[in-house]
Amino acid sequence: MKPTTHKLSAGEKIGYSLGDLAANLIFQTLVTYLAYYYTDIYGLTAAQSSAIMFTVGIIAAFAFNPIIGALADRTNTRWGKFRPWILWTSFPLGIISVLAFTKFGNEASVAYAAVTYTLLLFLYAANNLPYGALSGVITGDMKERNSLSAYRFIAVMFAQFFVQVFMLPIIEYAGNGNKAVGISKLMIWLAIIGTAMLLITFFSTRERVQPPPEQKTGLRDDLKSLGKNKPWFIMLTLTVLVFITLAMKGGAYVYYFKNYVDKQSLEKFISPVIGWLSSAGLNFFGAEITSAGLGLFNAGGIICMIIGILLSKPLADRYGKRNVFGVFLAVSAVFILLFYFFTPQQIGLIFLAQILHGFFYGITIPLLWAMIADVADFNEWKNNRRLTGLIFSAMMVGLKGGLSVGGALLTALLGWYHYQPNSEAAQPESAITGIRLIVSLYPAIPFFIGAALLFFYEIDKNKEALIESELLARRARLQTHQ
């Protein structure tokens, strides 16, 4: 039997990456605007928003993800284990993403928000968890896996760029000043585009890595095997920490620009760019100075993140994923911390810190998911059990748990510091202090802890090479005997 090649074509890498672009049209919206949507558009209080985001998020993390992971590992179809889930969930995910950001009537319904958010997180787990696990079986070549991650997260950056740069201005433009109408219209288009991209991912990829033929299916044995996997525990904790930070600072920037940054200084700083964009036909971008400033602020960070992503693979190939991840995660945290010290008028320094943070954090972005796939290889190498779906489901627990904790902390801290939603008057000084801390000190702490945690992660560059060579040899022997 001819051995399976683990080299991937550019077409397959692009097709796979479109799935994450689609998912991140939703995910980046949740990270960046869900708290703001609930408090300032939909009409919930900060306490109600915090309760929904935390409660539903924790249920999704600890119930939905393990269930989907176990089911995906036990799925056997002619399309593979994980690809079918992308097909089955593509249309329902698009529909619920629209409903979750649509307001019916004038009064905000806590029940409606909770139900739609629950369904959205369930379908997101059923789609994105198998999608992530697919990266662990699409190839067994770790350098190809690094390359695939780079493709994937460049696509993620396109989604993040759109959401963080253009989404708020488009919402105001599409709704003619009514943000509730504008966000509903925009989500309809994002759902259509995202569904099409997920279908492309399904049709353009294939699964090459199969579990060992002698592996018996049993959840108890799977969990027992996972319990012996120290790198898995470390990556789970790291995932939680990373997404706490992303949710806190990502959701806080809109409050930072709305309530802290000096509007006149901001307008003076960005006016040349707005003028150039207007001449290019992007007239909606300058509709409101805070939205325009936030969009350009995010744009600078994301563009530099893409540059960092492009450097990730060569750096990881040379120095190993673990070392590169730890160093640049710590450096990026320094630039988050600096936000506390900027005055409202120091617009140039605010933008510069975002650009440098984006560049250094961008180097780490592809490494997280590539390392999680390496953890699945480590488990197969050490325990002779391939648990791709379960391992990725655990990481999605960490992602959803971190996202939920970070988002809930954001809204809870806003309430703690007496933030007044939709207030035309100036915020109290305590709220301004809280906003400054939420974009600086609080989100920097998890990044620093995560960087320190990687000192205990044993899969360095040498062990990566050992695991890859031994697993490829095992699989080749099995193929020759089939």
Image (spheres, rainbow, N blue to C red):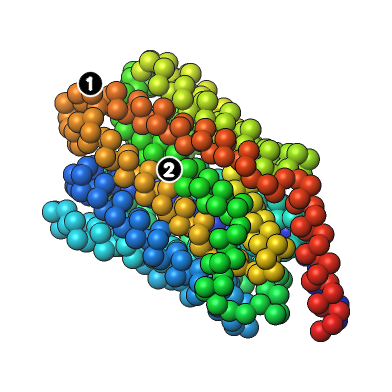
Residue 3 image position (x, y, % from top left):
84, 74
For the point 67% across and 66% down, the residue is 383
Work out whether residue 34 can be spotted.
yes
Work out whether residue 12 can be spotted.
no
For the point 51% across and 35% down, the residue is 449
For the point 72% across and 45% down, the residue is 460
Image vertical order of residue 227 relative to residue 411, above or below: below
Q: Quadrant of the N terminus?
A: bottom right
Q: CA distance from mark 2 to mark 1?
A: 25 Å
Task: Give the mark nearest the N terminus, 2 or 1.
Answer: 2
Q: In which quadrant of the rendered view does residue 443 lie?
A: top left
Residue 141 image position (x, y, % from top left):
76, 59
Instruction: State the mark number for residue 429.
Output: 1
**SS of the residue at dot 1?**
helix
**320 horizontally vs 89: left or right:** right
Image vertical order of residue 287 relative to residue 225, above or below: above
Q: How many residues crowd around disc 1 within 10 Å: few (fewer than 14), some, or many (20 or more)?
A: few
* Residue corresponding to mark 2: 244
Q: In which quadrant of the rendered view does residue 346 lie?
A: top left
Q: In which quadrant of the rendered view does residue 326 lie?
A: top right
Which amino acid type corresponds to the residue marked 2 in the rendered image? Ile
| Front label number (2 vs 1) | 2
Instruction: State the mark number for residue 441.
Output: none
Viewer-proximal residue among 205 and 323? 323
Q: Quadrant of the C terminus?
A: bottom right
Which amino acid type corresponds to the residue marked 1 in the rendered image? Glu
**266 horizontally vs 42: left or right:** right
For the point 31% across and 45% down, the residue is 408
Q: How many residues crowd around disc 2 within 10 Å: few (fewer than 14), some, or many (20 or more)?
A: many
Residue 138 image position (x, y, % from top left):
68, 66
